[in-house]
Amino acid sequence: MLIVGLTGGVATGKTMVSRVLKEEGAYVIDADRIAKELVRPQTPAWKELVKAFGKEILREDGSLHRKKLADKVFADPSQRKLLNQILHPRIRREMNRRAKEIEEKDPGAIVVIDAPLLVEVGGHHQMDRLIVVTATQTQQIDRVKRRDGISTEEARRILSAQMSVEDKVKLADFVIRNEGPPQETRKRAREIFRELRKVGSSDKKRTRRV
């Protein structure tokens, strides 16, 4: 099994890339999706978040109000650290469980770990290969404004709280610059998957913990 990290900055286009890799035959483990599952009402992580950040981060139905939580953590690095301490160990354990499950049924699998903060939490050290998706800062701001319905100032604040994409590029085995037409990005993703197939067939790796 080959473990491949997929990361980048906010709104750089990781979702499109992960979709192409899945179409090509990769197994994709999505850290954001796992995080959403882990914070469903009354779960242990949900209870810890409410205890740490207060009931104001909840909607009327008890579900997590992600924007209100984001407003808290992006405004204060210590709050962001606390959020990571609550969520990331749980996310890591669940990703490990899913990767092990995949290996048991398909030992030759290419498993893509789609995680925005993979580098920030040191997870890239456990990857066999690392893909970084980039976009210009202007593109990131425009995309996140459209996606989340926020102001330019809010978008800039989110970007400034993250590690720069170019610093992640320095660690990458493969870079996808999602700055032009979508078809070019998809073409590059397919090219990379072909390279990963070669790596997987020629270099049998031991299972690594995510």
Image: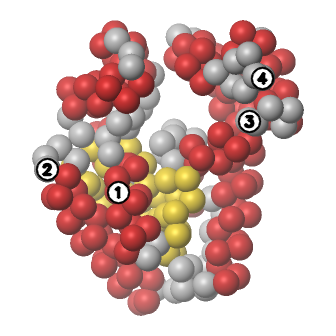
Between disc 1 and disc 2, whose residue precedes?
1
Q: Are marks 4 and 1 in contact (CB under 8 Å)?
A: no
In three-dimensional space, the C-alpha distance between marks 3 and 4, rounded to whole angstroms, equals 11 Å
Q: Marks 3 and 4: which is nearer the front?
A: 4
Residue located 70% across and 18% down the image: 59
Callout 2 crowding tier (Cα within 10 Å): few <14, some 14–19, many ≥20: few
Judged from the image, the secondary structure of the residue bearing numbered disc 1 is: helix
The kind of residue tagged 4 is: Gly
Q: Quadrant of the N terminus?
A: bottom right
Residue on which the image places disc 4: 62
Which one is in front, 204 or 58? 58
Residue located 70% across and 82% down the image: 104
Between disc 2 and disc 4, whose residue precedes?
4
Residue on which the image places disc 1: 17
Judged from the image, the secondary structure of the residue bearing numbered disc 3 is: loop
Residue on which the image places disc 2: 181
In three-dimensional space, the C-alpha distance between marks 4 and 1, rounded to whole angstroms, equals 33 Å
Q: Marks 2 and 4: which is nearer the front?
A: 4
Say how many tags the image has: 4
Q: Quadrant of the C terminus?
A: bottom right
Percent position of residue 200, x then y? 44, 83
Between disc 3 and disc 4, whose residue precedes?
3
Residue on which the image places disc 3: 39
In three-dimensional space, the C-alpha distance between marks 1 and 3, rounded to whole angstroms, equals 26 Å
Q: Are marks 2 and 4 in contact (CB under 8 Å)?
A: no
Q: Residue 132: in sight, yes or no?
A: no
- 105 over 50 or under it: above or below: below
Q: Marks 4 and 1: which is nearer the front?
A: 4
Judged from the image, the secondary structure of the residue bearing numbered disc 4 is: loop
Which one is in front, 85 or 135? 135
Q: Residue 30: in sight, yes or no?
A: yes
- 52 over 165 or under it: above or below: above
